[in-house]
Image (cartoon, rainbow, N blue to C red):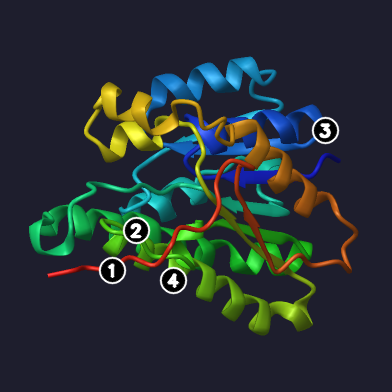
Amino acid sequence: MPQIALITGATAGFGKAAAQRFVKEGWNVVLTGRRKDRLDALVTELGGPKRAHALCFDIRDEAATEAALAELPAEFRAITALVNNAGLALGTAPAQESDLNQWKTMIDTNVTGLVTITRLLLDTLIAEKGIIVNLASIASNWPYPGGNVYGATKAFVRQFSLGLRSDLSAKGVRVTSIEPGMAESEFTLVRTGGNQEAYDKLYAGANPLQPEDIAETIYWVASLPKHVNINSVEIMPVSQSWAPFQIFRG
């Protein structure tokens, strides 16, 4: 029987690329997201309902998450890999100018949604001796102006991953935190409210990471022998490195 990966936020970017990568290697996939049209199209692309199953819900909604998982067909229940990819950044303003509702949306998605689906699937992952791959960010380690709550949510994801490792090591469940740097995807359009000019300016000449690069990393850690755990992977494009410390001169 094929192994099964459940991938959150699978309608674009890292999640979609990861789904394509797993299916290429013979896995079946459960795809989650809010955009039903994109989910349905991806199921078709990946080989139809025998290879992929779509669950359409908002990961911020605990009841909807629980109900969707409860409706999984029997052939998609033995999940061996949970890829917690769903997440977002909203806004680039300094904290004192930020929108509190945007902060709460990031926390509800990147933190609360992630821990909810993880907890709901833990018994299955323990039974299957599976793997949890959490998508954090270099922002979990390296702060920058305007990163405020987004960076804090990703620091939570990184620390939660380490805590899960501690709790699950005796259960044979592997846990990895993947922490990408500059990567080109819809993520930046969401963050800037659809500002194509800002998107183009950010990536111009940078040769950023692509979703396929992150998907390759996700699949690599999931495909390693069961006794091997990659605790964390910090990954940047060659063009990106660490900036000088910020200094305000008044």
Between disc 1 and disc 2, whose residue precedes? 2
**Residue beneath the point at 29% across and 55% down:** 106
Give the spatial CA distance, label 1 vs label 2.
42 Å
In the image, 241 versus 61, the foreground residue is: 241
Give the spatial CA distance, label 4 vs label 3.
31 Å
Between disc 1 and disc 4, whose residue precedes? 4
The quadrant of the image that shows the C terminus is bottom left
Q: Mark 2 — residue?
A: 62
Give the spatial CA distance, label 4 vs label 2.
19 Å
Residue type beneath disc 4: Phe
Q: Compared to 99, does 207 lie above or below? A: above
Q: Mark 1 — residue?
A: 247
**Residue beneath the point at 59% across and 36% down:** 209
Of tags 4 and 2, the one toward the viewer is 4
Q: Mark 4 — residue?
A: 156
Q: Mark 3 — residue?
A: 25
